[in-house]
Amino acid sequence: MNEEKRATFGGRISAVLVAAGSAVGLGNIWRFPYLAGENGGGAFLVIYLAAVLLIGLPLMLSEFSLGTATKRNAVGAFRQLDKRWVPLGYMGVLSSVLILGFYLVVAGWTAEYMIHSLFSDQVQNTDPQSHVEAFNNFISNPWKPVLYALLFSVATHLIITRGVQRGIERASKVMMPLLFLALAVLAVNAILMPGGMAGLRFFLAPDFSKVTAETFLMAVGQAFFSLSIGLGTMITYASYFKKGTSVRGTALQVTLLDTVVAVLAGLVIFPTVFSAGLEPGSGPSLVFITLPSIFCKMPMSALWSTIFFLLLVLAALTSTISMHESATAYLEEEWKMTRRKAAWCVTIFTGLLGIVASLSLGIWKAHTLFGLTFFDLLDYLTANIMLPLGALLTCIFVGWKVDRKIFEQQLYPDCRSGFAFRLVRFLVRYVCPVLLVVLFADNIGLM
Ligand code: PFF
């Protein structure tokens, strides 16, 4: 497809909003707190922040550069620069589709919680145990969560087929500032609750005694998941950047926004967990059993709960759109399908994955592989294996295969690069690959 025919985002602010829309989502508000809760709180936060800075940001700069340099989807970008690396693009597209499979399920839960807040008085129930029961009953129901996941899938499909710019930009523009505001208000509320300080200590004071090699892998995997990198989504998105959009500025702002939202989510969740006497290591249910405990203590609980879950729905939607777009753009450009047909293929396939993932938490719970349900398997396989592997290979590609000038030109199009560029390149060439190899070796027991 030639450059004129490709869609572009409206400009600098839009680029930031749209890329941040992909990054900020359930990864920040659902996945980050539950992993931090299971892996020692503050210690996980420290490792996570280091991973974002040392590997996440350089990798985002690399993926953006591949996108702006080639103006192609994740597969096309590698095809244009070096055909032998095309499989890396395939792995990325596969990762987006697999993530979408379980992400749609959790996104469906947020939609159910939003609607439930409007029409039921469960929100006013102050017994934390009743929230745990309500959640477990809901996710193991054979119909409801499946229908919500499919609803989410259809909503994503509709936005994708209406085109890149209108849908995604608009949703991100409204959602992002409101989400910040809501999280900040909730964080203050949570910290002021009796027992809230103990939660704050858990989240901010690192206790490294619980840290293992796996904690590092989890933190690094979460950094990639949260920043939407290691799978080519950001290559696809950057390919729509308008000429003149700053790659450096956009990457910095997206990384910062994404990290602030994750930290804010921690500041909401952990004080509430401790105040309500819940378990920080409750796993994927953590946010869904904790948030109702904070809403029920607030005046106008139903309204607060509805607004917050609506924001979560929007945050999840701007992320599902980006995963869907990555796969749709691939089919459209590489297989020459119409956009409509490409989008249907992705929607149907990920919808089926979503159905199986959802049922694997209820009636198909007994069917496991390596001790994991299908839902957990998709999550583990993508975040802890495919994304770190994709990230490692992308660093090697950008650091060692792509001409230095191409990378430099994307980051510094109209001025001479200096120390900062040399530092980024050093991180991409040496630090990221070495850290990722050590991490893998350590986790498969080679070290
Ligand atoms: N970054 C998203 C989140 O934190 O919710 C999830 C995600 C979106 C992962 C897009 C991967 C991706 F390509």
Image (spheres, rainbow, N blue to C red):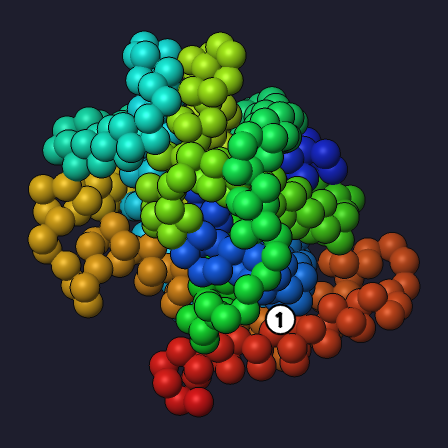
User: On the picture, is 271 further left or further right than 13?
Assistant: left
Whether residue 115 is visible here, answered yes or no, is no
The percent coordinates of residue 414 (x first, y second) are: 87, 55
User: On the picture, is 5 further left or further right than 356?
Assistant: right
Q: Quadrant of the C terminus?
A: bottom left
- Dot 1 falls on a residue whose secondary structure is helix
The percent coordinates of residue 378 (x first, y second) are: 29, 55
Give the vertical position of 170 relative to 250 (above or below). above
Whether residue 148 is visible here, answered yes or no, is yes
Graded by Cα atoms within 10 Å as few (under 14), some (14 to 19) or many (20 or more), the crowding at tag 1 reads many
Report the residue marked by disc 1. Answer: 398
Q: Amino acid at mark 1?
A: Val
* Residue 360 vs residue 245, the one in the foreground: 360
Give the vertical position of 213 relative to 155 (above or below). below
- Callout count: 1
* Residue 17 vs residue 91, the one in the foreground: 17
Give the vertical position of 96 relative to 161 (above or below). below
- The residue at the point 33 percent across, 62 percent down is 381
Quick one: which residue is furthest to the bottom in this view? 447
- The residue at the point 59 percent across, 27 percent down is 189
The percent coordinates of residue 332 (x first, y second) are: 41, 44
User: On the picture, is 340 further left or further right than 67?
Assistant: left
- The residue at the point 57 percent across, 77 percent down is 435
The percent coordinates of residue 238 (x first, y second) are: 61, 48
- The residue at the point 57 percent across, 57 percent down is 42
Quadrant of res 7: top right
